[in-house]
Amino acid sequence: MKIDNQREIMNRFAEQRIKFGTQEKLAEIVGVSTKSISDFETCRRNPSFATFIKMCKTIGADINYIVYGNKEN
């Protein structure tokens, strides 16, 4: 299975995050700045693996979908 490029991954993440709520809300829960969330979503910075997993879990996103674009389990 091929991992999509970073921009596609973060576009899917942002799409799911919008359903969850604001960048501010996510940043507060995850413990990073709102600017960090913005930078991650626009590929200016990369989150650590642990932060990425925490962000996905917080918004209830399927990590398989975020990384691979695959909606099937």
Image: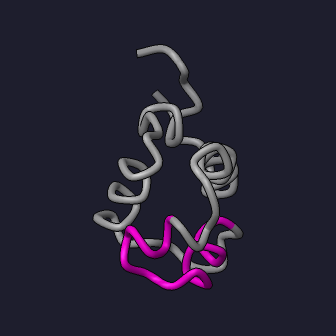
Does the magenta-highlighted stretch encompass residue 40?
Answer: yes
Whole-percent x and y of residue 28?
A: 44, 75
Give the residue at x 33% y 64%: 49
Is residue 40 found left or right of 1 in the rendered image? right
Residue 44, horizontal then vertical, whole percent: 66, 79
User: What coloring was used for the rendering?
Assistant: one colour
Residue 20 location (% of width, % of height): 57, 48
The answer to whether 39 is drawn above or below residue 15 in the figure is: below
Residue beneath the point at 42% across and 50% down? 56
Q: Position of residue 5 (x, y in %)?
A: 62, 50
Viewer-side residue, 4 vs 10: 10
Location of residue 12 by image quarter: top right
Q: Quadrant of residue 50?
A: bottom left
Q: Residue furthest left?
A: 50
At 58% from the left edge and 73% from the top edge, which residue is drawn? 24
Say left or right for 57 vs 13: left
Please name the predominant secondary structure of the magenta segment in the image.
helix
Which residue is depicted at the point 65% across and 74% down? 38
Placement of the C terminus among the 4 image quadrants: top left
Classify 66 as above or below 64.
below
Which image quarter: residue 22?
Answer: bottom right
Q: How many marks?
A: 0
What is the magenta range?
A: 26-41
Q: Which of 24 and 49 lies nearest the eye of the viewer?
A: 24
Q: Nearer the viewer, residue 69 or 3?
A: 69
